[in-house]
């Protein structure tokens, strides 16, 4: 028995299969509960009309170690890429809907000096606030990203810059999300030097300090695609024919290399012994030597409850939110007054909409205007209750598109998706929680590795790198 089992056929599970195959070349099987691979990545093609709908992520950023790692994977799979360079309008223009108007966020140093709505003071004043505010009251292990931003840069930055950004990334409430989710290095600089700007300047002068944490150093020799992305200044990219090409290509590659991807195969129990693990699948128990779980924490928890109730309880401490995605297609490409990537809505505006993405500004959609409206998140139940109808969700999205973007036309075509428990929330203390979960697994010597959005970052780059790093931690088999 040398089989490794991967639970979950989303992008992290498929990536785990890919890296296991390349590292060990041993037999392995991926078990996916649903009838398709890809998890939340889903592209809907409307080729006859020249557009696509993305119901999950649509672009990938090529930055840092994680970005370089994904580009290496994309290159190895020979996938055609659609880049957006940093000079493109979708990379330059990002907007907020606040105080009853669409506001363009500053995109150059000049924007720091002027007063731009919704802010009532020039943004350089927020930097001065950080420089003139004393050090931390007490050394903190963690705090909310909202309280950190408010403390260092003032309430306006927390309300109109940080809070909407958190809505855009994880559909969460910045007052609950850990500062270590996005601003770990800034938080550590503040803790060490008594201020963010001071910390950034000191570490610039003392370059060696951040060598070990260098986020721009790829894992291996950078791939040609990564070098191209740097040279051509890509801000983000997608794949020709949409992002679902990535999980599909991974599945095809795995199939060609004798990796068994079993769809509609839900694992309903997981138990461990000194010589491996046993998976409960339908009516069978299957012995395996190691399990890599890319399942959401709340799905893994009940599988281990019987044998490891405290591990189950720790996993259930990671909360998730529901997000509504409404794709809208209009027969004209002249509807938007202002082009850009899209807009975010700060929670202080008290609207059900988290943001609107202007898909047809990012990529050519053959004369159509394509918008994606995202709603709910942390505030889903407050706005929509328990079981909203598709019509109710569609009507809410269209009503706010009319109000915010002044688009009077009715969409020709639309799709509504309710993504239940789709994004984990890295609430205050998350880093410690994940460490405790992994310590438990190590202390009990469980043949179990955890990767995916619940642990090491919620973006596509994060979950792919999470899979790779967990596979690389596995010991190579002893050769006699």
Image (spheres, rainbow, N blue to C red):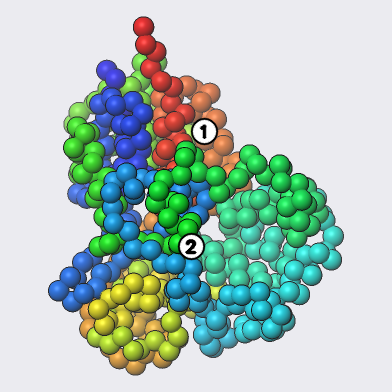
Image quadrant for the C terminus? top left
Q: Which residue extends farthest left?
A: 48
Mark 2, residue position: 233
The x and y percentages for residue 427 are 57, 53
**Residue appearing at x 30%, y 75% in the figure:** 364
The x and y percentages for residue 75 are 34, 48
- Rendering quarter of residue 312: top left
**Residue appearing at x 33%, y 32% in the figure:** 22
Q: Which residue extends farthest top?
A: 480
Instruction: Please indicate whether residue 349 sits to the left or right of residue 209 in the image.
Output: left
Relative vertical location of residue 449 with respect to residue 363 in this rendering, above or below: above
Of discs 1 and 2, which sits in the foreground? 2
Instruction: Please indicate whether residue 232 sits to the left or right of residue 32 in the image.
Output: right
Disc number placed over residue 438 in the picture, else none:
1
Classify 10 Å Cα crowding around label 1: few (below 14), some (14-19), many (20 and above).
some
Report the front residue among 88 and 360.
88
Answer yes or no: is residue 275 visible.
Answer: yes
**Residue appearing at x 47%, y 40% in the figure:** 221
Disc number placed over residue 137 in the picture, else none:
none
The x and y percentages for residue 346 are 55, 74
Secondary structure found at label 1: helix
């Amino acid at each position: 028995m040398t089989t490794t089992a991967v639970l979950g056929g989303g992008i992290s599970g498929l990536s785990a299969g890919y890296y296991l195959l390349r590292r060990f070349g041993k037999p392995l099987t991926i078990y996916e509960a649903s009838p398709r691979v890809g998890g939340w990545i889903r592209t809907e093609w409307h080729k006859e009309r020249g557009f696509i709908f993305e119901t999950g992520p649509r672009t990938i950023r090529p930055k840092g170690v994680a970005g370089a790692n994904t580009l290496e994977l994309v290159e190895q799979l020979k996938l055609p890429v659609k880049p957006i360079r940093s000079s493109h309008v979708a990379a330059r223009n990002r907007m907020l809907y606040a105080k009853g108007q669409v506001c363009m966020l500053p995109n150059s140093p000049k924007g720091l000096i002027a007063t731009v709505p919704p802010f009532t003071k020039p943004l350089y004043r927020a930097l001065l606030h950080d420089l003139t505010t004393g050090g931390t009251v007490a050394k903190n292990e963690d705090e909310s990203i909202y309280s950190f931003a408010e403390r260092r840069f003032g309430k306006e930055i927390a309300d109109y810059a940080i809070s909407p950004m958190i809505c855009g990334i994880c559909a969460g409430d910045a007052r609950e999300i850990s500062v270590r989710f996005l601003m770990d290095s800034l938080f550590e600089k503040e803790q060490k030097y008594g201020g963010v700007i001071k910390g950034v300047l000191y570490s610039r002068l003392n370059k060696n300090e951040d060598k070990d944490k260098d986020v721009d150093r790829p894992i291996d020799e950078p791939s040609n695609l990564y070098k191209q992305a740097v040279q051509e200044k890509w801000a983000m990219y997608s794949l020709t024919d949409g992002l679902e090409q990535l999980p599909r290509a991974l599945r095809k590659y795995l199939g060609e290399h004798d990796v068994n991807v079993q769809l509609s195969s839900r694992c309903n129990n997981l138990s461990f012994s000194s010589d491996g693990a046993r998976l409960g699948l339908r009516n069978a128990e299957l012995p395996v030597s190691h399990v890599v779980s890319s399942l959401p924490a709340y799905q893994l928890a009940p599988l281990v409850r019987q044998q490891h109730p405290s591990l189950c309880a720790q996993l259930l401490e990671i909360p998730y939110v529901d997000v509504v995605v409404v794709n809208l297609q209009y027969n004209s490409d002249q509807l938007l007054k202002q082009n850009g990537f899209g807009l975010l809505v700060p929670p202080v505006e008290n609207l059900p909409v988290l943001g609107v993405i202007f898909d047809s500004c990012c990529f050519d959609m053959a004369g159509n205007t394509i918008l994606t409206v995202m709603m709910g998140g942390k505030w889903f139940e407050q706005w929509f209750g328990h079981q909203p109808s598709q019509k109710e969700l569609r009507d809410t999205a269209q009503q706010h598109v009319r109000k915010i973007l002044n688009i009077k036309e009715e969409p020709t075509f639309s799709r509504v998706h309710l993504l239940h428990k789709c994004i984990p929330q890295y609430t205050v203390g998350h880093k410690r929680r994940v460490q405790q979960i992994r310590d438990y697994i190590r202390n009990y010597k469980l043949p179990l590795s955890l990767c995916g959005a619940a642990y090491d970052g919620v973006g596509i780059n994060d979950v792919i790198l999470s899979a790779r790093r967990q596979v690389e931690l596995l010991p190579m088999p002893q050769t006699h």
